[in-house]
Amino acid sequence: MHVAIVTTYPPGKGTLNEYAFHFVRALRAKEEISRITLLVDALPDGAPYPAPAQAAGQAELCITPCWQFNDPRNAWRIVQAVRQAQPDVVLFNIQFASFGDKKTSVALGLMAPWLVRLAGFPSMVLLHNIMETVDLRNAGYAGNAAIEWVMRTAGAITTRMLLNADLVALTIPKYVEILRAKYRAKNVLLAPHGSFEDNPPMPTFELPPGPRQIMAFGKFGTYKRIEIMVEALRILEARGYTNLEVVIAGSDSPNAKGYLDEMRARYADVPNLRFTGYVAEEDVPRIFQSATVTVFPYTSTTGSSGVLHQAGSYGCAVALPNIGDFAEVITEEGYVGEFFEPNDPETLADAIAALLDNDERRREMGLRNYRASCGLPIADVLDWYLLHFSALIEKHHRQPTRRARNAEAAQPVTELATPATKP
Amino acid sequence: MSTTMTQLSPQVILAPIAGRFDAHQVPKVQKEIDAALANGANTVIMDLSEVNFVDSSALAVMVRTMKHCRERNGELILCGVRQPVRIIFDLTRMDKAFRIFDDLVAARASVGV
């Protein structure tokens, strides 16, 4: 089976690149897969993607940059790239802001799954968030109620376009229920997020020497904001806690360029605030394993959290905002954390203090999160996808599509006209 | 939760499962099914009439078992699926992938054992 995946991918820094990396790594190991074509966003200045390594038993991997953040022509360019690659099925690993932060680019980009289907290729969308559960104002996408209304209306139209794909997979049961109820969608399904590591080694739960690190990981500036962490640090120091360091691991969200530079300047007087910049894949374990507490400084959430799954696989104790999606992930996948109220540094300081004060609690929480992360590896989730891919391919073979009809029309006349028997 | 595999024919085994089919029970069920398949079986009938809950790891076992059975030219057959489990199948669209029969009698008849 030849699968094309429209996605971001490292070293590209767009959202969901990390998820794509682990998804593709596991997919390449599946014997059903002969080839994967990644249809990715172009790197800055047209830099080439590194050639993928090829190990024995792995599916061939081809990386084709064919779209760009905020380019209104993305859908058209993706369809052209799909026609060129001729895959058996096309998967979109996306969220609502994958193709841009300008409304036109977003709307046009999200037409791609529908257009790919119209071009005759089975299309499936893995949609990491839905408009109905995103707090647009807190997430930084809408400045006032009027803009929010316009965005929600546009979001509903865009969602209907996305639902024109053959299948739409969502990572949270509530999302499936919402789309089925609101849009009467029959082609949506639950596909759990899955943990990145197949068999992550048991963490030691030991911390490195030096200051106790309070770490946040991700792409910052929209709904992931670090101000609350700095405020909580100040509160903790005022309470007498010493030897603390706030570590901001990651870079700006593509939707909030310049945010971390602004924070660096604003908090220049905070000596124990450290910015790591973009974290390369090989440095990720060290970053998580060095943290006493991993904080999710979110004002809103836009879907299941890959960072939470990563934190779990490294046995991290976590401080989580009291927001619906996280509570749901925790309940259903076995994660635990200390909760704080979004935008309230006092409660974040309390949550961090609970883990600083009780090392046994920190280790126990890390162990539970580790076990939760082992529950359903992404490799197992991929078996579900393969089932859906096979069903889609079979369905498309049963129902001749425009592509099949075009291909048939392109056959030599003699082949088409050969009768079964002669009179 | 409990399972006791029964060999219905050289190719067909019956896996009756009861209670919560979740991450705590998955390793045992997977181990027993893998052993039966390694011994020459190629079709598994999973009787879920006494199961009141399945989680994603149990679904993963079913998908994996179906894959292994098909590799051996066999099939995974489910029967006796109760409403709470049916809801999960519907949510994941696994009801479209699995062969599901109302009860064990119908499931056994489908493979002639």
Image: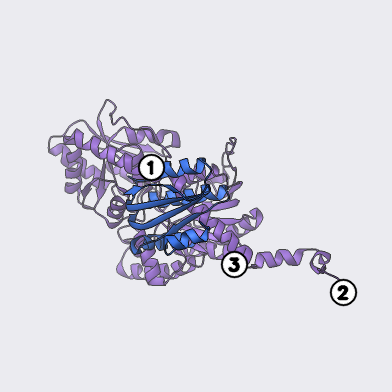
Q: Label 1 is placed on what type of residue?
A: Pro
Question: CB of mark 1 within 8 Å of CB of mark 3?
Answer: no
Q: Height in image: A86 above or below A54?
A: below
> What is the CA distance from the residue labelled 2 to the residue labelled 1?
64 Å
Q: Residues within 10 Å of mark 3 (few under 14, many from 20)?
A: some
Between A285 and A382, the one lying in front of the other is: A382
* Residue at 28 percent of width and 31 percent of height: A205
Chain A shade in the render: purple
- Secondary element at image label 3: helix
To which chain does the residue with label 2 belong?
A
To which chain does the residue with label 1 belong?
B
**Disc on res. A416:** none
Please name the residue that numbered disc 3 is placed on. A118
Supply the letter of whichever chain is blue. B
Q: Position of residue A18 (x, y in %)?
A: 44, 44
Q: Residues within 10 Å of mark 2 (few under 14, many from 20)?
A: few
Q: Label 3 is placed on what type of residue?
A: Leu
Please name the residue that numbered disc 2 is placed on. A423
In the displayed structure image, the side of residue A213 where residue B55 appears, left or right: right
**Same-chain check, marks 1 and 3:** no
Q: Height in image: A413 above or below A16?
A: below
Answer yes or no: is residue A244 visible.
yes
